[in-house]
Every structure is written in structure tokens, then in C-alpha cells.
Amino acid sequence: MNAGISLNASPSWDNPFIFSHAIGGVPVRRLVIAAILVLVLSPSIIRDNASIRLMLVTPTYDGSGQATHPDVLYIKRGLGWRYWMVLTPYPNGSYHHENPSILVSNNGRDWSEPKGLRNPIVDPPSEGHYSDPDIFLAEGKLWLFFRWSQGLEERIYAKSSENGISWSREIVVMETRSESLLSPSVVVEADGLRMWYVDIRPNPNLLKMRTSRSPEGPWSEPIVCSVEGVPKDRELWHLDVVKVGEGYDAFIVLINKGKGLREAELYFATSRDGVRWKLSEVPILTPSVRDWDNSLIYRSSALLLEEGLDGGVHLRRYALWYSACNKGKEWHVGYTELSICMDGDELKVCGGP
């Protein structure tokens, strides 16, 4: 274990992301209370495009600046940058450009390619295509998982790095022809790793989980998870899983069954064991009315900021980096913050319907 690298699930408030910029020329430090009140007490605003949603500038190797499927890792110290993001360029939905790329930041807002690294960090494949990257810290190193697919063939590749700049050659850690491995999301725990993904070959789509003692495997056979509350006209799609004290939270994209990605929205789910999940009745993030994210909400990456009790209701506040598409088919990554209230079996954005 590299003792110089430490992971802190909750960034300290001395350098929070949303505090460090200005809105309309007014420093956000003066608007902190108002911003939190908007996000916590008026979540309906989120659904009608009045929430604080920031479109981020994400440099891409193809020059388009368009990207999708972000995954963000917060590292308190040891690698020079606090925030590490993996994403894939996606200019106007072109899967040929979905080659994993790394960006870094010290405030979660301003992203750049780290000095000494050249994106993409893996050469485009000669056949098939890459997608769905996930970044995590294990065994004292950064690890990157990403999916490769062609026809019925599916693989999860892995690369590792001790400094985030020089990366190992990719290795296959999982391959199959019997299921799809959509949107892998890895959580590292004391006794090993858990990886969730979505299999879209059955009807309906299934959430599955595998376990391993090491990122390199061997990985267990899949465990089929149950997700209570999926609407009949919706399908599970991409997800991100976060470890919390008493279990796991997930941010899951649901799409219209049989209609592709149209009207994709983000839902929240929670589980004590990682196998049995409860889904929020309504989405926690939906497309805006006329902004850069007005067509669909896609894969998101969440970071727990704080949690506690408010009048007996359990509340968790999350930083959320999310990808989205506008009606002009342009893809970008944005940032917002959401507070989730858990009152018994009810899961929703605090103050929401």
C-alpha cells in the first residue's frame, strides 16, 4: 500500500467546488446559504431548470469538448490533484471516439489534462469499441476499468497507475458472450471489491453484481440484484454506486422501454446489502427546459458531501457530476448538488413531491 495516497470520501469545506466561482459577478461565498436552500428546500426547481447546474469545460483529444460517462474520484493527498475524472469523448454521439481519457482538477470545476499525460490513455481498438469507464483506488494505485464490446462479445479491461500519468498496459479482467457488462461501477471495501453493472440482454434489463479480492480478479459469478420500484415503462441503464455507512447508494439512469435513450432521467436507489435495492418513485434529475442538458440525463458520478438527521429524516447531500445531451445532440458534462431525504421507504430530493 502506498501510504502517500489517501482517499477521503468527503472533501473538506476549505475548497468546495461550488463555493469557488461566481454567478453574475457575485462571489458564490455570498450566495452559499441561498444556494443550499435552493438545492435542499426547493428541489422542484431542479425539475424546471432553475437549479444551479453548471456545464463544465472538458478538453477532449478530438477537440470537440463533447464528452459523456464521467466518473470522479476524490483523493485528499498524494497525487498532486484532488479530483480525477475519467470520461470518454462523444462528439454528437459518435461511439468511435469513446476512448477513456483522464482529466484532473483541484476544485472540481476547472478540468485539464495533467502534464505528462496524453489522452486517450488507451489506443482505439482495431475492432469493436470502448465505453463506460470507472476509476477507483485499490492496492495503493489508481485503477481504471472500461468496457469493450462487439456483437455478443463483452470485456472489461483494466489499467493501473501509481501516479496517474504513466499507466500500465490494459489487461482483460472479465469477458463473456452470455451477458452485457454495461456501466461497471466498482466499490472497494476492506474485504475486497464489488462491481455492479447492467445486463441489457434479458427482458427487463437486470442489475448484477460480482465480487473479487483484487481488481485483476478472479471475479465471482454474477449475482442478480433486485430493484424495487422500477416503473413498467422504464428500463435500468447506466449507474454509479457509492459506499455509505450502512450500505450503498446508487444513481441509476432509467430510459423508456423500447424507445432508446429518449427521456432518460436519473433516479436514486439505496441498499443495505448491495443486492436488494429500493428505487426512488420519481427521478432526482431530469432534463432542463431549454439549457445544454435539455434532451436527456445520462451516466452520473456522485460524491457524498455530508449526511445527518433533519427532523428524524435521514438526509445525504451529494456532489454530482453528470453527462447530458441537448436537443442538438451535443454531449457535455455538468455539475450540481442534491440532497436526498430518506424517510422510511420514501426516497426523494429533500422537499420534493
Image (tube, rainbow, N blue to C red):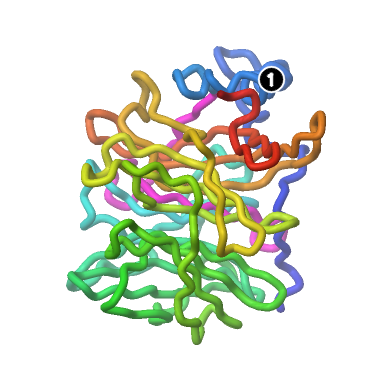
Instruction: Residue at 76% x, 38% y: name it.
Output: 13
Residue 332 visible from this viewpoint: no
Left or right: 146 as drawn, with respect to 9: left
Left or right: 10 as drawn, with respect to 270: right
Amino acid type of the residue that numbered disc 1 sits on in the rendered structure: Leu
Q: Which residue is mark 1?
A: 37
Q: Residues within 10 Å of mark 1 (few under 14, many from 20)?
A: few
Instruction: Residue at 76% x, 72% y: name it.
Output: 3
Foreground of the two, 353 or 105: 353
| Relative height, residue 303 to residue 154 (above, below) | above
Where does the magenta region start and end? 52-81
Left or right: 280 as drawn, with respect to 126: right
The answer to if 111 sits in the magenta stretch is no
Residue 54 visible from this viewpoint: yes
Task: Name the image quarter holding the C terminus.
Answer: top right
Q: Position of residue 292 (x, y in %)?
A: 36, 27
Foreground of the two, 175 or 75: 175
Instruction: Residue at 25% x, 55% y: name it.
Output: 97
